[in-house]
Image (tube, rainbow, N blue to C red):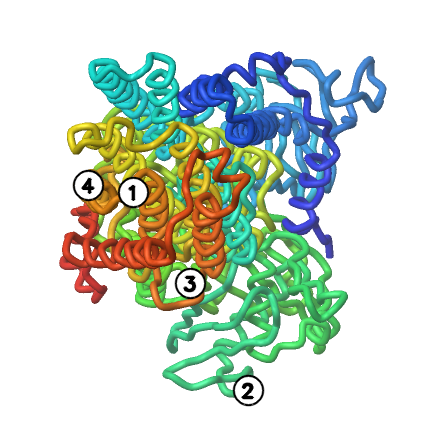
């Protein structure tokens, strides 16, 4: 019996080549990369703020701002370099050495030296070095899943059928041998065409686009307001130098320079939490992008399915049965009519599976330790038959010893069947044949009555519609004299039954898809597999109802598929078509996450807003092209990562509300104070001190807030929505007006009672803002983020120190206050906390509305009768 290379071993060899490649980076100068990072509008605002703080002599604040800029620039450059390794990883899938025939002699040459016209020899375990056509083959079986997404290895042979006679670079020979005439190398090969598609990245993330728009608006508003403050001061006769410094200080105070630090911290914490959930982040901004995802485009094999073949359905003329179990492990059950059966209980099933195990060239390999699963060696379809037989209780070793193989007719694509001959204990011969139903269910092959053949054909069609790959199995016993002629082996057989084989969906796929839809994310399936298989997996997973339309890559190519974004299942797609589908969704305004594991998924992973690769079975190309790698290959991990992404975005908005409310308050105090008899309400140094304390540790601590309850029960924020949208602007202005009002009232009261009014305003303004920070918590009353409480307490102590410590008083120009004033300031701080909590209750944030992409999902839930929780 011939044993082939397992698909796991093939994937391992591909991964080895990928892991040993040294990435050849595109030679973009470092200075150009740095300039690209510094072009971000918010970074430009921070650079201006740094210059202004240096002009005021505030070296500590300038150092903090420059440090934030440096860290963000370095991180951005490193991430850009890492992302470009995807194209370089493609060269990893070329075989390092190829055996070619030149000048009539066989020789080994580097794969890079293979040229069109070369005759290449392939054997089990070889990686095909270039595209070519098969000249001759013996049992040649090639795993093309990395390129096409097909779950089942493909038989290759010389002939008229182009799909059977062509092989592609990067595929793996899992069985047999052959000779191939090379037709395409380099950019003209399958891998070369995919490499050409991977040159374009997805661009800015949704948060980066929002912050860029926000930075431009903020810069214009700050410049205008500071000009107004400067003009008003000069009109009142204030010294020019003082008002220029005041205007500059106010500009610095209004800029939330801690925002990049808050974003970086939130993203880093999200990445760490995702790693705890088996999601490895390769590009930090991808953390937030997940929270904005509106469409999840998923691959089939190994993502929605288990990435293996399983004989799940059995049919014999007496009845049906179901096989259950995990992987290729022989432990499992065969059930009929709700009860478990064995080979002794069901002789018809025993005959079917015994024949399937005899006419079989695969093997099952037990794990070397208890932690790894059983492995299939050879054709995974045949391994699935062995597993089903073992679960019925058939001993493969005893079967081979009792019925040794004496001859065979190998499978070929023309006959679509395989036949083996075995010697029986009585001296006769048993002929066993298995193959496609269309090649088997014929009077030329079977001697069964017509009604049996029609029943079997109807059952085979029903299984095929359910996404199963169907095999028919037949046998006959003969005396040795008659059976010696091979021409008689495949005639007069008796049908034993049908076996339905498929790559079973993961147990978690349906719940994961339901969770996506409840979160407002539209799931779609893009695969290179057969349309019937794609529809069946999509229906089992809950992506579509069984009656929903499935389009194919060919229809997309011809332009007869209609609007691509109106469909949910795309089968028989090429890498170019996967790219077009992802781009169509993005062009329609969606944020797309694409999952995949094969080389053919690489371009789409790179083009999507976020690419998600499988860590265990994924190719190196897919992992390098992706922003996120799932260490457990579980799609449910994406849902957990989406939750983290939404937490990041919520924390960015939380910080902006807090920081900009404080900046608004400071501007209002400086604008309105003169009209209340206070020529210069705050000195420049006092403004910068408040800004340093409130935007420093407390602001950064807000980026570590936990996820708010119910965040996965509503759709994501629309991509076009402003970062201050959904009602944040009114809340920001209201809180800014409140803080400014409290500060001005305290200042007027202090001035009227003969107190140091400027020092009291300085203390009250900072303390009230810190109270607002404490009231911004996602989960008040808990210790989920103790760092925020510590940061607020420390900042409040430093704010008081600015009034009472002599060195700070000299620096800030403050005067000591009586204890009663300190109590008043602390009480107002608590009032800031209360008002922040109250306005959140009175003016809750508007939840995002489900976009147009969500409507078909809701209609499907109603039409197919599935009960799911409605979105809120």
Residue linked to disc 3: 508
Q: Which mark is residue 344?
A: 2
Quarter of the rendering containing residue 245: top left
Residue 779, horizontal then vertical, whole percent: 35, 62
Q: Residue furthest front?
A: 754
* SS type, badge 2: loop
* SS type, badge 1: helix
Residue linked to disc 1: 657
Residue linked to disc 4: 737
Q: How many marks?
A: 4
From the viewer's perspective, tell me whether residue 432 is left or right of residue 403: left
Q: Nearer the viewer, mark 3 or mark 4?
A: 4
C-alpha span from label 3 to label 2: 34 Å
Q: Nearer the viewer, mark 1 or mark 3?
A: 1
Q: Nearer the viewer, mark 3 or mark 2?
A: 3
| Residue 673 to residue 225: above or below | below
Residue 535, horizontal then vertical, whole percent: 32, 50
From the viewer's perspective, tell me whether residue 408 is left or right of residue 691: right
* Quadrant of the snapshot with the N terminus: bottom right
């Amino acid at each position: 019996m011939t044993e082939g290379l397992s698909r796991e071993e093939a994937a391992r060899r591909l991964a080895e080549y990928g892991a040993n490649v040294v990435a050849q980076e595109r030679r973009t100068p470092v200075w150009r990369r740095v300039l690209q990072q510094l072009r971000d509008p918010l970074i430009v605002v921070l650079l201006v703020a740094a210059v202004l703080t240096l002009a005021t002599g505030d070296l500590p604040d300038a150092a903090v701002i420059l440090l934030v800029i440096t860290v963000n620039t370095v991180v951005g450059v490193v991430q850009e370099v890492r992302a470009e390794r995807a194209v370089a990883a493609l060269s990893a899938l070329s075989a390092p050495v190829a055996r070619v025939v030149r000048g009539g002699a066989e020789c080994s040459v580097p794969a890079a030296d293979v040229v069109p016209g070369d005759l290449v020899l392939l054997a089990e375990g070889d990686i095909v070095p270039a595209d070519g056509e098969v000249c001759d083959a013996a049992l040649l079986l090639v795993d093309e899943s990395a390129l096409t997404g097909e779950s089942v290895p493909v038989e290759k042979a010389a002939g008229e059928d182009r799909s059977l006679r062509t092989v592609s670079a990067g595929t793996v020979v899992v069985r047999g041998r052959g000779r191939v005439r090379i037709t395409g190398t380099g950019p003209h090969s399958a891998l070369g065409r995919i490499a050409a598609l991977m040159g374009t990245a997805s661009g800015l993330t949704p948060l980066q686009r929002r912050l860029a728009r926000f930075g431009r608006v903020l810069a214009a508003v700050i410049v205008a307001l500071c000009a107004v403050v400067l003009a008003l001061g000069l009109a009142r006769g204030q010294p020019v130098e003082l008002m220029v410094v005041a205007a500059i200080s106010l500009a610095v105070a209004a800029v939330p320079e801690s925002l990049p630090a808050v974003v970086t911290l939130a993203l880093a914490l999200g990445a760490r939490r995702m790693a705890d959930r088996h999601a490895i982040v390769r590009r930090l901004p991808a953390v937030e992008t997940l929270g904005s995802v509106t469409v999840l485009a998923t691959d089939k094999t190994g993502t929605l399915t288990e990435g293996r073949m399983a004989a799940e359905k059995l049919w014999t003329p007496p009845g049906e049965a179901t096989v259950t179990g995990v992987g290729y492990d022989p432990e499992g059950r065969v059930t009929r009519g709700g009860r478990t059966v064995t080979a002794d209980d069901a002789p018809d099933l025993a005959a079917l599976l015994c024949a399937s195990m005899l006419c079989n060239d695969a093997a099952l390999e037990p794990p070397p330790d208890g932690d790894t699963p059983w492995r299939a060696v050879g054709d995974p379809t045949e391994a699935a038959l062995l597993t089903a037989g073992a679960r019925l209780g058939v001993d493969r070793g005893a079967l081979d010893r009792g019925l040794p193989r004496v001859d065979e007719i190998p499978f070929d694509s023309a006959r679509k069947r395989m036949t083996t001959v075995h010697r029986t204990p009585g001296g006769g011969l048993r002929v066993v044949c298995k193959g496609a139903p269309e090649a088997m269910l014929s009077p030329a092959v079977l001697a069964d009555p017509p009604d049996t053949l029609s029943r079997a054909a109807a059952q085979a069609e029903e299984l095929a519609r359910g996404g199963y790959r169907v095999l028919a199995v037949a046998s006959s016993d003969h005396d040795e004299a008659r059976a010696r002629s091979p021409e008689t082996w495949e005639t007069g057989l008796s049908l034993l039954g049908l076996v339905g084989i498929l790559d079973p969906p993961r147990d978690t796929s349906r719940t994961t898809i339901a969770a996506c839809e409840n979160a407002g994310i539209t799931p779609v399936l893009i695969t290179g597999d057969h349309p019937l298989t794609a529809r069946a997996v999509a229906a089992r997973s809950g992506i579509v109802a069984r009656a929903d339309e499935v389009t194919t890559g060919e229809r997309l190519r011809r332009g007869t598929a209609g609007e691509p974004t109106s469909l949910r299942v795309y089968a028989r797609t090429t890498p170019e078509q996967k790219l077009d589908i992802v781009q169509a969704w993005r062009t329609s305004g969606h944020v797309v996450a694409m999952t995949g594991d094969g080389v053919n998924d690489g371009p789409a992973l790179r083009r999507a807003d976020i690419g998600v690769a499988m860590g265990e079975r994924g190719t190196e190309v897919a992992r390098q092209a992706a922003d996120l790698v799932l260490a457990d290959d579980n799609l449910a991990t994406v849902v957990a990562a989406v939750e983290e992404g939404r937490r990041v975005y919520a924390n960015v908005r939380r910080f902006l509300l807090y920081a900009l409310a404080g900046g608004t308050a400071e501007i209002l105090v400086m604008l309105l104070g003169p009209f209340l008899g206070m020529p210069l309400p705050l000195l420049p140094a006092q403004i910068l001190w408040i800004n340093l304390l409130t935007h420093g540790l407390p602001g950064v601590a807000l980026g570590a807030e936990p996820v708010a309850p119910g965040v996965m029960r509503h759709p994501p924020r629309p991509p076009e929505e402003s970062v201050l949208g959904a009602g944040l602007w009114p809340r920001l202005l209201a809180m800014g007006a409140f803080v400014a009002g409290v500060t001005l009232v305290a200042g007027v009261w202090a001035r009227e009672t003969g107190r140091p009014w400027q020092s009291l305003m300085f203390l009250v303004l900072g303390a009230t803002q810190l109270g607002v920070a404490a009231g911004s918590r996602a989960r008040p009353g808990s210790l989920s983020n103790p760092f925020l409480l510590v940061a607020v307490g420390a900042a409040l102590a430093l704010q008081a120190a600015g009034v009472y410590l002599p060195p700070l008083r000299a620096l800030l120009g403050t005067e000591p206050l009586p204890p009663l004033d300190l109590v008043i300031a602390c009480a107002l701080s608590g009032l800031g906390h209360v008002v922040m909590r109250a306005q959140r209750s009175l003016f809750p944030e508007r939840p995002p509305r489900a976009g147009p992409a969500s409507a078909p999902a809701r209609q499907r839930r109603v039409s197919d009768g599935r009960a799911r929780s409605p979105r809120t």
